[in-house]
Image: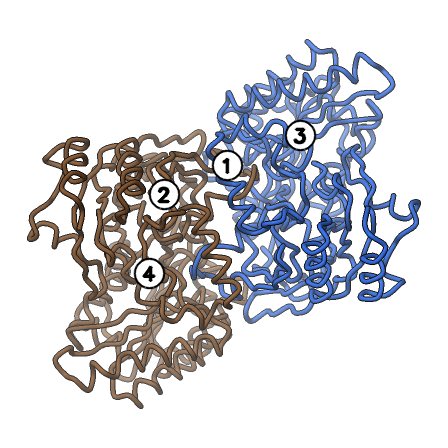
Chain colours: A blue, B brown
């Protein structure tokens, strides 16, 4: 528990209206998009980096945890305050400080909603490509802390590839700037990319300099249905290695399609076992030509349905349906565990096939969908908490999926991070030496372990 | 000096033919592409990561420096053994272990010449985009250690953007793997990108997993000459903000052009004060249309010469001339200091204009060329060591250039790193707090400071 005196100090610093002390209020910041929850001792909405720095100094002095939080849309428990302490909700730091079309940069605070940033830069004819499915409600600070990906990563990369510089409150309470507003920079160690994906354990990000790109003049969306999984994954391989440079290449298996009934603006023949959803960007002639060649590849590999969405409305519906998969899984089961392993591209067929086998063997619905174009497959293990058999099978399924992923030379997380949920499995991927080094690195930043403790490391 | 017993141990480990002890032999590994030199106590050509690990353990036990070295083409003294010790020349680790067109990855050892890798992947219709000017003789390990850039970075990014995973011998002698062979990955702290640009101070890179891309089907090269600097830099701004996405956008000022006489396959009108050299990549229609629009922009801004190199031979000559600038500077002066600052795109005109002013004021030839498309301008301060006035003016010029760069919100190094030459200026860019954090980070990796000591930090 936080001493009363500390609560008073913090309240005086940020103002009474920016602090939550009542249990029912604090409870709203106890959880994220997993089913984990832990009660914070205090919830604070700081208004400036200097306030955060003061609170962090007190955390070192009075030994309490500090847990930074954006919109709480994380999928691995990264912002759940497992050790109590102060949750710093960064939603008040929500200003777009600058959009500069000459320098092709934006400077933003961490609490900016990603979708708001995307729209704001579009007014300048510019583009911020990373597009996590939660873009309409997640924050850019959370995207940086987790190194969020999304469907556009195939061609355009992930959050990491767009962050040029950061202002960060270190776990010691010092404020530093990392990186710069230049496209290139190699001065000292790359702290900017070290903070990327560090899950709030190395500091509180308070300002972000982002690289923007010109918006491609034309985009076309394509959907292709296949009667078997093998044909769909073969099409993925062919498209990726045939100079067709898709912007997005998403995959949905049959169970996923069942969740999406009535949400897809397509009438799928009942025999369709997998759908690929693609986008192609660029100049109009080339988009048309590449789209045609992609359609050719899909038809050649036996696609039974190919839809070319030239109308923006249909394309938007298709992408909206894709973004709705996660909430739509409640149609099959009320609960789920959402994994996001990534495998080498050639291993996608084995991954999906063997996951379906695990699903059958354990009698649990497991759906596979997501970013086939970069091997980052979302595997959702669905269950009903009230059914003991299902509840008990979930951890078995998760462990089998992770072991399978490692056997295929894959990684436990493509874009969600480790947080709490994957921490027990960390040693499946990192050697004891690598984990020890990572812990020394954490200690070099955070000698008193006050910043988001209990995350990443088991 | 290294104890005789240590030299014997190392010789027994790697074999007599892989060790240099004679001063005249060691001298060949005392310098890099700067004019700095320092004699190593021993030069070793290890044949495996396990050998390196043993040597590094001895370095901790017997307290001697270990300095990794590729081809010695660095421009900031990064591989110069200022504190003596063992230079580890990694040229024997020169195998391309795998090129996998299904997974779109290559696995290589650090001593592979970058140009050899580029050619090898082209046989598979694939592409490794980073293309430093020294590609024909530098090593990929050095590229990773310095985070090398090159002309293609405008559209395709730098070395950092292509490294998926690494095997590294840590300064403790442990061997770890960082990253993976997947396109995405966020498991634990991003050690892969931390090693990128760490200049051999955090470990010895012994294996590299690289991301490859399909080679763009079409490329066109363009050259445009302008009678004044302002028009040339205005064209850079217009091209970058007009959705024309050049692959490369290189700039050469008048003094640079003087160095290149007879090397450029163009007859430049005498009034030309600056040349832009561009490449446009992609699908054929798109390339043709963008090239035409770029020509339009250049003409509109007063270009007096526009060459469209549709013949590959001419295009190759143009790019070869660009890569020859650095050696060609001897035509103006025998010595040079080569800086590679980067500024925000809108600051390029001010940078180049003010550098010319510094040149006039100090009476030193200073040439500006390089990667205008990402704001990374190579500023070469030319001098004759035998002319005292020039020799003494060089450090004044360098300091003025760095201060100017910082005033323009730029960074001291876009792609060469800090090494020895820029270490005295580090505090122009990083705060005392940031430097202290970076030193703690170094200590977490290298408690006895044996790995490439004396670099980065002043």
Q: Is residue A445 above or below residue A77?
A: below
Badge 1 density bin: few <14, some 14–19, many ≥20, Cα 10 Å: few
- A44 on left or right of B131: right
Tell me the chain of label 4: B
Please tell me which residue is depicted at 32% across the width and 81% down the height of the picture.
Answer: B397
**Disc 1 element:** helix
The label on residue A339 is 3
Q: Are marks 3 and 4 in contact (CB under 8 Å)?
A: no
Find residue A133 and report its horizontal and vertical position in percent: 71, 42
Cα separation, mark 3 vs mark 4, equals 42 Å
Please tell me which residue is depicted at 73% across the width and 57% down the height of the picture.
Answer: A111
Find residue B20 and report its horizontal and vertical position in percent: 11, 44
- A88 on left or right of B286: right
**Disc 3 element:** strand
Badge 3 density bin: few <14, some 14–19, many ≥20, Cα 10 Å: many
Q: Quadrant of residue A186?
A: bottom left
Cα separation, mark 1 vs mark 3, equals 25 Å
Q: Are marks 3 and 4 on the same chain?
A: no
The label on residue A436 is 1
Find residue B119 and report its horizontal and vertical position in percent: 28, 42
Please tell me which residue is depicted at 58% across the width and 30% down the height of the picture.
Answer: A426
Q: Is residue B445 above or below residue A166?
A: above
The label on residue B171 is 2
């Amino acid at each position: 528990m936080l001493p009363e005196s500390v609560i008073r100090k913090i309240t005086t610093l940020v103002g009474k209206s920016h602090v939550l002390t009542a249990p029912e209020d604090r409870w709203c910041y106890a959880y994220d998009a997993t089913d984990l929850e832990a009660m914070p001792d205090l919830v604070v909405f700081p208004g400036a980096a200097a306030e955060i720095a003061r609170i962090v100094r007190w955390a070192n002095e009075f030994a309490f945890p500090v847990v930074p939080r954006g919109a709480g849309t994380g999928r691995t428990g990264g912002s759940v305050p497992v050790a109590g302490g102060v949750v710093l909700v960064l939603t008040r730091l929500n200003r777009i400080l600058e959009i500069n079309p000459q320098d092709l940069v934006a400077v933003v605070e961490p609490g900016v909603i990603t979708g708001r940033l995307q729209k704001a830069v579009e007014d300048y004819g510019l583009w911020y490509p990373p597009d996590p499915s939660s873009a309409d409600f997640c924050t850019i600070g959370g995207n940086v802390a987790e190194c969020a990906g999304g469907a556009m990563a195939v061609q355009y990369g992930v959050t990491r590839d767009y962050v040029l510089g950061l202002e960060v409150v270190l776990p010691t309470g010092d404020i530093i700037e990392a990186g710069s507003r230049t496209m290139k920079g190699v001065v000292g160690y790359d702290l900017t990319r070290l903070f990327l994906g560090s899950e709030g354990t190395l500091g509180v990000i308070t300002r972000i300099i982002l690289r923007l790109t010109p918006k491609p003049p034309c985009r076309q969306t394509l959907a292709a249905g296949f009667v078997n999984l093998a044909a769909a994954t073969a099409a993925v391989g062919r498209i990726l290695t045939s100079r067709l440079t898709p912007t997005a290449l998403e995959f949905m298996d049959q169970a996923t399609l069942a969740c999406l009934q009535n949400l897809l603006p397509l009438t799928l023949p009942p025999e369709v076992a997998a759908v690929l959803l693609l986008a192609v960007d660029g100049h109009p002639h080339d988009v048309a030509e590449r789209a045609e060649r992609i359609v050719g590849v899909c038809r050649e590999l036996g696609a039974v349905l190919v839809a070319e969405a030239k109308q923006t409305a249909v394309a938007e519906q298709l992408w909206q349906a894709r973004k709705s998969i996660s909430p739509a899984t409640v149609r099959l089961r009320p609960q789920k565990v959402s994994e996001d392993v990534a495998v080498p591209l050639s291993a996608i067929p084995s991954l999906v096939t063997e996951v379906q086998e695990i699903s059958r063997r354990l009698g649990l619905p497991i759906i596979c969908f997501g970013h086939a174009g970069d091997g980052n497959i979302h595997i959702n293990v669905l269950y009903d908490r009230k059914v003991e058999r299902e509840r008990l099978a979930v951890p078995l399924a998760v462990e089998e999926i992770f072991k399978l992923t490692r056997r295929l030379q894959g990684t436990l997380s493509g874009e969600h991070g480790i947080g709490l949920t994957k921490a027990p499995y960390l040693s499946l991927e990192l050697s004891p030496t690598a984990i020890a080094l990572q812990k020394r690195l954490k200690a070099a930043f955070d000698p008193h372990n006050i910043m988001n403790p209990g995350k990443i490391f088991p």
